[in-house]
Amino acid sequence: MPFQMEWDCYCLPIDLTTDLSVEVIPDPWTDAVAYRAAHLAYLSIQNFNAAGYYDKLFTDRLREYSLAARVSRVTNPYGRYAGGY
C-alpha cells in the first residue's frame, strides 16, 4: 500500500576539489558568485559602503541573467492589447 512521505532534510552539493568536479550552479549565474562573496567579505570587516556596492552588483547581475533566461510571453496572438476600444 503506498504511503505519503514528508522528508525533513536538505541536500548539499559536493565540494569542488578538482577541475573535474561538477559545478552545481549553471552558467551564466556562476559569474555572480564573486560579487556575493565580496559582499559577505566586506560585511565581515564592517566596510558597509563597499558591501552595499557589491550587493548591488550581485542583484543587478542576477536580474540581467534572470531576464535573459526567462521565456517571454506574447500578450495577445493578434498583436493587440487585451481590452480597450
Image: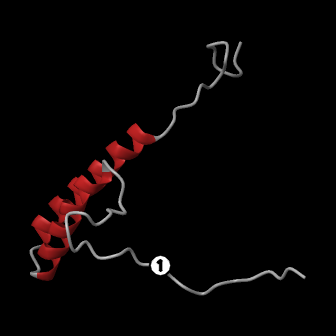
**Which residue is found at the position 42% from the left and 41% from the top?**
69
Tell me the quarter of the picture where residue 6 sits.
Answer: bottom right
Seen in the picture, residue 3 relative to 29 is either above or below; the reply is below
Relative to residue 40, is residue 29 drawn left or right? Answer: right
Residue lying farthest to the right in this orientation: 1
Q: Where does the image place residue 50, in percent across and percent down from the top left?
A: 10, 65
Crowding at mark 1 (Cα within 10 Å: few <14, some 14-19, many 20+): few
**Which residue is found at the position 22% from the left and 74% from the top?**
17
Tally of numbered tags:
1
**Which residue is found at the position 24% from the left and 61% from the top?**
33
Front residue of 49/8: it is 8
Tell me the quarter of the picture where residue 48 sits.
Answer: bottom left
Residue type at mark 1 is: Cys
Secondary structure under tag 1 reads loop
**Which residue is found at the position 62% from the left and 26% from the top?**
75
Residue lying farthest to the bottom in this orientation: 8
Seen in the picture, residue 53 relative to 42 is either above or below; the reply is above
Q: Where does the image place residue 24, in percent across and percent down from the top left?
A: 37, 63
Seen in the picture, residue 35 relative to 79 is either above or below; the reply is below
Colouring convention used in this rendered image of the protein: secondary structure
Task: Classify the position of the C terminus by image quarter.
Answer: top right
Task: Classify the position of the N terminus by image quarter.
Answer: bottom right
Front residue of 64/50: it is 64
Q: Which residue is mark 1?
A: 11
Front residue of 69/63: it is 69
